[in-house]
Amino acid sequence: LGPVTHLVIAFALLATVFAVWPQPTGALTGEVAFVREDSPAARAGIEVGDQLVAVDDVASADFTVLREALRARPAEPSTIVVERAGEPLTLTVTPEAVETADLGTIGVIGIATEPELRRLGAGEALVEAAVGTPAPGSPGGVVPMIGESVRGLVRILSPSGLGDLVAQALGRQERDVEGAVSLVGAASLAGQIGAREGGLPVVLTLLAAINVFFFLFNLVPLPPFDGGHLAVVAVESTVNGLRRLRGRHPDFRVRPEAIAGIAVPVIAVLALLLVTTLWLDLTDPIRL
């Protein structure tokens, strides 16, 4: 029941995020959200909150159209029209020429725009919370989170992962920003992400991811995890089923000392994980 409770909590948190807050559609609006310092846009006078309207003779409400117009003008002075406080404003900007592997030389002015958002219906929110695919600005659903958590568990609990964790705790390696954290570290990350990227919905998403992780962690088929108890029950049921088929009394039980022989090293690994992550989070916390 414990692991299932974690999964239900994760689903409920994600469903709340999808139902209450507008979600990105994958498209971008023309509203400027960020202007890089000392960029062509900053030098031209473009400000956060400006609405891009036109680039030279290209006018469009679709930011991707205006972006392509700018990309086609590397190092060429261009006239850009923005709407600021409801009034049109004409500025001159010279896109910086940037070499890319797939697009060749393009013009870049150093801005980012706000994503397009829309509200989901109740049914859509539930579907997204279950199986939604992670997208920029969107947490995705429980199923993709499970996949990511499985990969994380395998990486962290592998011999190389545990070795790296010990090396980091001893100061022989730099802290891995994508490595394991304790509950102290998770709380710190939640505060940092919430303050930087949007408050409560981001924190709820992180809490959902933590619950998914605990769901999987408890299902590890080794004692003392819940999955270990289920594994013992499965072994006993299988053996006793075979005994019944052979006409023997179904009285097989896994010996407690056998369970303890597995549980002790598992507990030792857990203690190592707890101590090293707590030490790292106190002495070398991850800063985003």
Image: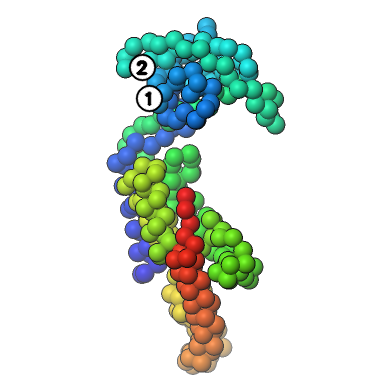
The residue that disc 2 covers is: 84
Figure coloring: rainbow
**In front: 250, or 157?**
157
Can the viewer see residue 252? no
In primary-sequence order, the first of circles 2 and 1 is 1
User: Does residue 3 appear left or right of residue 238 in this picture?
Assistant: left
Q: How far, Cα to Cα, is label 2 from label 1?
A: 7 Å
* Residue at left offset 47%, top offset 12%: 91
Q: What number is the disc on residue 264?
A: none
Vertically, is 182 above or below 201?
below
Q: Position of residue 281 (x, y in %)?
A: 46, 64
Q: Position of residue 222 (x, y in %)?
A: 51, 77
- Name the kind of residue labelled 1 in the image: Gly
Helix, strand or loop under label 1? loop
Residue 137 location, quadrant: top left
Vertically, is 159 above or below 150?
below
The residue that disc 1 covers is: 49
Q: Residues at badges 2 and 1 in contact (C-beta under 8 Å)?
A: yes
